[in-house]
Image: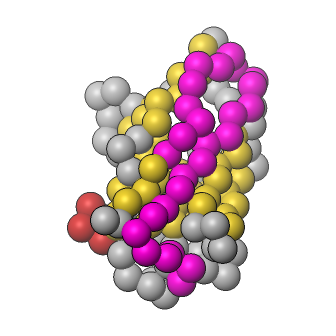
Amino acid sequence: QVRVVESGGGLVQAGDSLRLSCAASGRAFRASAMGWFRQAPGKEREFVGAIGWTGRTMYADSVKDRFTISRDKDKNTMDLQMKKLKPEDTATYYCAAASVAFQWPLSQKDDDNIWGQGTQVTVAS
């Protein structure tokens, strides 16, 4: 079974840092884009950032210069390092891995990716 699983969420204070991880299993995603999305209560899911098979990255303006995505293709994992967290970063964070290789940017459509169950990040003010 192909799946991705997030870990590392929690409750932090504004200004703190937190690192999320995503582990993929069932197939290799070496040639696929991977990324992070988030959804706050009452809001639509939004793109956070993505990383391609070459290490190329892209970020939402709201997290640029604060969040950094990295991946280890050998371990089939991806991380999201979050710094200077703000209360508005509070959300459930989802890992996504593109089902099709060599496609960029990462699609936001449900059917185009393998999605994790999400991990909660809460930033207290």
User: Could you tell me residue 99's position as x and y percent?
Assistant: 36, 75
Q: Is residue 89 magenta?
A: no
Tell me where the magenta segment starts and ends, as one range: 6-31
How far across and down, in percent of the image, does residue 76 sit? 58, 67
Please state, as top left, top right, bottom left or bottom right, where the C terminus lies in the image: top right
Give coordinates of residue 97: x percent, y percent.
44, 66
Residue at 24%, 67% in the rendered image: 111
Asked if residue 13 lies in the magenta stretch, the reply is yes
Q: Can residue 113 be seen in this view?
A: yes
Q: In which quarter of the image is residue 108?
A: bottom left
The answer to whether residue 4 is above or below residue 54 is above
> Measured along the vertical axis of the image, is residue 35 above or below residue 42?
below
Instruction: Please identify the quadrant where the N terminus is shown.
Output: bottom left
Q: Residue at x 53, y 56 (%)?
A: 23
- Residue lying at the far left in this picture: please name it: 111
Residue 64 in view: no
Residue sitting at x 49%, y 76%: 28
Q: Nearer the viewer, residue 91 or 64?
A: 91
Q: Residue at x 26, y 61 (%)?
A: 110
